[in-house]
Image (tube, helix red, strand yellow):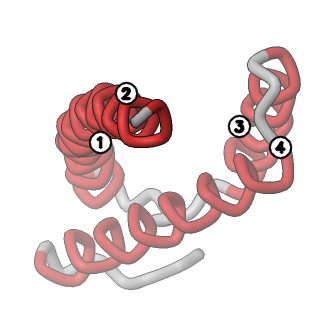
Amino acid sequence: MNEEKDMADARVILAGYRASIDNIDAALIHMLAERFRCTKAVGVLKAEHGLPPADPAREQQQIARLRQLAKEAHLDPDFAEKFLNFVVREVIRHHEQIAANNGVTKTG
């Protein structure tokens, strides 16, 4: 009987954690969507002015900044860097597409 109550209690706690995780996942998706709206505007601006899709100096600054933020948040900095690199690759791909659609030659 006590074991059944413990399992029932565990399921309630698990459901609470899962609800929180679902809310966080939804927030992450919305934040990524907003981030990509901003980076799209950057891509358009770069294409209009013939700037290269990638900015390695900016990327390195962002990696250092986000690694520090990850450390402060007790998140693995290597994971944070991998995540940022994934996002940046996607942003650059979008910028290259925007440049190609605007007749700008890819330069970096």
Q: Secondary structure at mark 1?
A: helix
Q: Residue at x 71, y 47 (%)?
A: 80
- State which tag comes first along the sequence, 2 or 4: 2
Within the image, what quadrant is residue 11 found in?
Answer: top left
- State which tag comes first along the sequence, 3 or 1: 1
- On the image, the x and y values in percent for residue 21 come to 34, 37
**Residue 9: image tag:** 2
Residue 107 visible in the shown view: yes
| Label 4 Cα neighbours within 10 Å, binned few <14 / some 14-19 / many ≥20 | few
**Residue 76: image tag:** 4
In the rendered image, which residue does mark 1 sit on?
25
- State which tag comes first along the sequence, 1 or 4: 1
Tell me the kind of residue under disc 4.
Asp
Q: Nearer the viewer, residue 92 or 44?
A: 92
Mark 3 and mark 1: span between their CA atoms?
23 Å
Mark 1 and mark 4: span between their CA atoms?
19 Å
- 68 left or right, relative to 81: right
Mark 2 touching mark 4, by CB under 8 A?
A: no
Tell me the kind of residue under disc 1.
Asp
Tell me the kind of residue under disc 2.
Asp
Residue 31 visible in the shown view: no
